[in-house]
Amino acid sequence: MVFNSFVFAVFFVIVYVLYISTMRRRVIQNVMLLAASYLFYGWWDWRFLGLVFLTTFLDYGAALAIDRRRFRGNDFEPSTRPYHHSPRARRVILAISIAANLGVLGFFKYFDFFEESASAALTALGFSVHMSTLRVILPVGISFYTFQSMSYTIDVYRGTLRAARNPVDFALFVAFFPQLVAGPIVRAADLLPQVMRPRRLNLEQTYEGAHLIFWGLFKKVVIADNLSPLVDRVFTASETPAGGVVLVAVYAFAVQVYCDFSGYSDIARGCAKTMGFEFDLNFDLPYFATNPSEFWRRWHISLSTWLRDYLYVPLGGNRKGPGRTYLHLMVTMVLGGLWHGAAWTFVLWGVYQGALLIGYRAAAGWFGPQRAIDRFASSAPGRIAAGLIFFHFICAGWLIFRAGSVSQAMTFFWAIFSAWSPIRATSVVQASDLVMLAAYTFPLFALELAQYRKADLMVLLRTPSWMRGVGYACLFYGFVLFGGRVHKPFIYFQF
Amino acid sequence: MLGHATQGSPSRKSPVWHALPRGALIAAGLIVALHLLVIRSVFPHPVAREQIRQRVSALTEHVRPRLIIAGDSRAAWQIHPLILAERLGLPAKEVINIAANNCGSTPVVAAFREFSDRLAPAPILLLSVSTWSVNDRSPTYLENDELLWSIGWVDRLRLVSPVQAGLAIFTPERRLWQRLAGLWETSTAEVAEQGFMGPPDNRHVAHSERSIERQSRLLEREWYAPSDLNGVRWRIFETDVQALLRLGAKVVLVDCPDHPAWLERIAGTPFGDTNALFHAKLRGFCQRLRIPLLKYDSEWCPGCEPDEVFYDFVHLNREGAIRFSERVAQDLADMLADGRFPAAPALAQSGDRAPFPLDFE
């Protein structure tokens, strides 16, 4: 079931009522939430519940086994068995856990991609190859919950977290329905303690949660879904559109993917917040970033921090000189791109993001605090200019991300930069589409500008009641007038 | 929603007031007030969609039509007003076509009610009706539809999802928005050829396996999905026709032809049963109300090759539209000759005179 559906609304109301009625019984409450989460996931496809069980069982056992081998001599809790301290055993168990998780992810997500790519490569080299493709179905959310579960095992191995003893608590951490299918990727250190202790509700949290749900739905149903036909028209056109048309479509996709994904995250955080759970922010006004480093501190924060903590830093981070730093950045971003999907466009997108980060790092040393350009960049006009310029670098990446193939991406770049032509009367995009893009982007930009200036994502909640009322009424009419025309699945469900 | 402590002295404000989601309550109040204002002052009755309203308005600006063609895509694509005007000896501008894709009977009633003073007294109204518009199992075309606007909650929930039923409450607001947005648009209403739309292109029906599958899937799901045809939409159809009669229209129902290959395909299946039930109910309804019915079976065009005149299984192409218009015009002329129903094979025989004299006033 999707967040923007009547079925989910009924499901959530029922779960919430049951949640409230079990506030004094945490254990029962957790069991109820777990059952609801499995029902939520099974609604998509009950066959893949087995994978969730497998990940849960595997990492629960692995973490316990690792945890029990972390003590020396008498330094253990009386309730635990006195295993010998065994670093090697702990490493082996961790390796098995990671290999199993990545194996499952690799098979379901990348098997067909690698098989087809290998077949194409061998054919190009002159070998006659015939491989039957399995057409493996991609289970929804597998990229998210495997990463989330792996981070838990790794944290237990590192000693920053103790293993969860209660299997229900751990299973709920893995499968908690608000963030199960499309994130955010929540760290065990953040969510497990909340699962393991009684929750307390207050009105402020409930209202903030409801606000997040409402705003998230607006971004998804009104903005993202209404921009998708425009984007699809251009990227599925039989002939290469004019450069101006491609540009408009890329702008539209930039807004669409942001509203789609951040909308989902907001709904997830809002649902959790109404139940007393706090998820970390996943999007922090990313299009206000002025450089790639800042962008990745604002966009899909749960993934970027996961890649930083479990891939970039273990590789060596920036501790081994500029050359190795650049290599680590590139590897991290390429794998991050590949995480998004099994296609060469995502790999190329990752390469592009890595190149941006490397380029920024390399160029950053050129600008010292005394230079005029740095002073300009710190000023308001400077930040606006930098933001606008960098936004176009982001859009170039989105063009690659959205393209159906690498060749289409290259063709579209050519249309923009070498064979530019404006929108014509016969284009698949018309002036009215530009007006529509501006109209849908305006409420988003207006609110986010206020959030940015006040440095407060909940700025609307701080305004006078009458202003909030008018704002909510306007958003409601957005739903009424423009919502429901187009029904598109959440983009990140495919990842 | 969140109360702010700095608004007013806390000692004077009730803690209950502070706890309430004031923003949401104010928003709800604004929405209710605006809704009542819109439906009470702007739209006291359901109105037709803007596409139809604009066409009727443009086509009745200088003349009061005496013959109106209305209904769904089958009327929009294949009943040409100019051919009817020529065959019936009427001035071209007095025959108009206001039919539209996915248009049932309710928008026609709404348009007729709104523009009745711009039509000739007691005009003849040719109304095409198809299975999809009276089948409760085919609600796909109800989005933003006048029908949902016209019925109560219980009937709405029988037809569509609760979300769609809820959104239908705000159909007046959507209509108002469309009207306001239309002030900025420069597009003109489709009034060429007296409103005739015609098929979108000049293709002929395709019999490839893939095309048959695609058409069949669509029709089985959207038109002929097995239903008792005794649900909400049939009841609304009967109410609408009676409303048109009370508004003074001389209603003539048109049951357009299907491709023989389609009829063969569904014969003996539940879809064929739905089709047969629809025709039987339509005939019975017309006999009961003594309304003329122009019913066309697969023999409607002697000497025509079906594949040459059909666009798809249920619509005619341009060539077919010309021939069909000529056939309809001839049948109408026969009916008008003495005001009775002629005993032609394609026509239902009521056995009695129509409740109204079938002529042009």
Image (tube, rainbow, N blue to C red):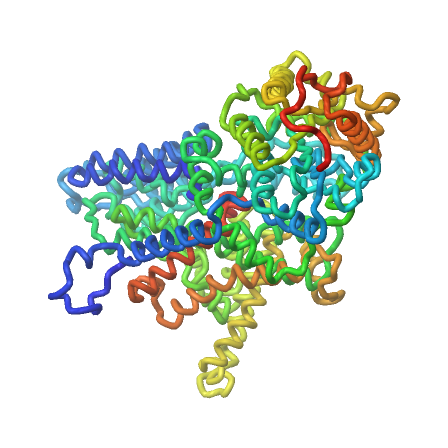
In the depicted structure, whether residue B157 falls above or below residue A219: above
| Residue B113, picture quadrant | top right
Seen at 61% across and 47% down, the residue is: B117
| Residue A316 appears in the rendering | yes
Q: Which of B286 and A418 is in front in this view?
A: B286
Seen at 41% across and 54% down, the residue is: B37
Residue A372, position as x, y percentages in the image = 50, 87
Instruction: Report whether A244 appears left or right of A11.
Output: right
| Residue A58, picture quadrant | top left
Quadrant housing the C terminus of chain B: top right
Q: Nearer the viewer, residue A131 or A406?
A: A406
Seen at 54% across and 26% down, the residue is: B234
Q: Please give the count of numbered marks on the rendered protein.
A: 0
Residue A259, position as x, y percentages in the image = 48, 55
Seen at 57% across and 58% down, the residue is: B181
Quadrant housing the N terminus of chain B: bottom left
In the depicted structure, whether residue B214 falls above or below residue A149: above
Q: Nearer the viewer, residue A239 or B319?
A: B319
Instruction: Report whether A108 appears left or right of A32.
Output: right
Instruction: Report whether A4 appears left or right of B69.
Output: left
Residue B360, position as x, y percentages in the image = 73, 36
| Residue B206 appears in the rendering | no
Q: Which of A243 and B144 is in front in this view?
A: B144
Residue A69, position as x, y percentages in the image = 26, 42
